[in-house]
Image (cartoon, helix red, strand yellow):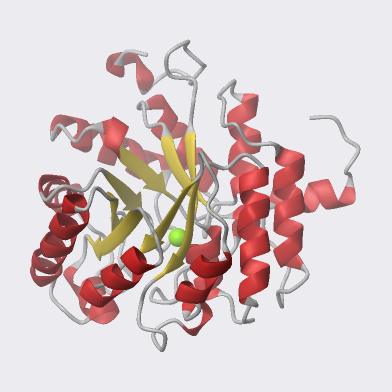
Amino acid sequence: MQPSETSQTIPTSAPDDDRVQIVEVGPRDGLQNERVRIATQNKSRFIQALADAGLRRIEVTSFVHPRAIPQLSDADELMVILPPRPGVRYSALVPNDRGLERAIAAGIREIAVFTAASDTFVHHNIHTSLAESLQHFEEIVKKAKGLGMGVRGYISTVFGCPYEGKITAQQGLGVARALLAMGCDEISIGDTIGVATPGDVARWLDAARSAEIPFNRMALHFHDTRGTALANVLVGLQHGVRIFDSTAGGLGGCPYAPGASGNLATEDLVYALHGLGFQTGVDLDRLVAASSLIANQLDHLLPSRYYQAARVQPCLPH
Ligand code: MG
């Protein structure tokens, strides 16, 4: 698709760009905001079921301080019992040097660092300024790249901040440029509090294209807090983005963003993508089966609409 025609046309699969990469972040971004503690063994089963469903990139945990996010305090044990799987990339969040050391010891080959487009959010979240967080991650990224590891950089609050409100495109783009310049292989653009509308996403992506941000190194990470996540994905597709983050069943939200809930559900994303003619490599029935492994351990229903429909009407053709 030509950039000039992407804003107006419904995306259809072209031979060379009909594959979409899904980065399944349920075991980390999803579970970190779930109140009920999931046993390490069950996390391992869940992750293996996600791989069985065809997901090839799975963010499995976070090497944060065990007290910071109790749900993920078993990161080291999880990596001991989770068998490596050829063709599946397991990644983990790393907040600092100690986290990187733990990730290396656990055999992780791909890490993610995280900052935000909004200074106040960074302050509340990791207790430094945005500039300091970038300086800090520069060393971690350099070290990880030196060891041949893959590195992803998350940017939270790109479309809005729970403390500062509206965030300009330039704020997020400045951080995106800094993360790419320090060696991140990929950046993930996060709508942490789920405020972005399709119009916001289109304007942001136009600005990103003007800023020469490489779209093949950029993922979009939407939350469905206000029901706009899938519409936002469609705009991303129209602009040529082919990497999207989601969580199985729509697990979790963000513990640092008051009121934020509902990561885009992988089932809903895959269903829409397949309907548009995109390939994901994901088997929806198996994905529902993976989500159901976690569903019966939670204190609430999984929000994924596809998951709910599949549980009620499993025989409907799709
Ligand atoms: Mg999220």
Query: In the rendering, at what x and y percent does residue 43 appear?
Result: 62, 67
- Across the whole image, how many numbered discs are drawn on residues? 0
Residue 166 visible in the current orientation: yes
As drawn, is 222 to the left or to the right of 78?
A: left
Query: In which quadrant is the C terminus drawn?
Result: top right
Q: Residue at coordinates 56% horizontally, 31% vertically from top-left? A: 280
Q: Is residue 156 visible?
A: no
Q: Residue furthest top?
A: 15
Q: Nearer the viewer, residue 207 or 15?
A: 15
- Residue 315 image position (x, y, % from top left): 91, 38
Front residue (pair 15, 256): 15
> Residue drawn 37% across and 39% down?
199
Q: Could you say where residue 157 lies in the image, as x and y percent from the top left?
A: 31, 61
Q: Which residue is located at x 38 percent, y 55 percent?
A: 191
In the rendered image, the vertical position of residue 175 relative to residue 300, given as above or below? above
Q: Residue at x 70, y 62 (%)?
A: 302
Residue 230 vs 298, above or below: the answer is above
In this picture, residue 200 sits left or right of residue 260: left
Compared with 253, 236 (above or below) is above
Q: Quadrant of residue 255?
A: bottom left
Between residue 58 and residue 250, name the one nearer to us: 58
Image quadrant occupied by the N terminus = top left
> Image quarter for residue 34?
bottom right
**Ligand 1: image quarter:** bottom left
- The foreground one among 170 and 248 is 248
Position of 171 relative to 34 (above/below): above
Residue 137's spot in the image, x, y percent? 16, 64
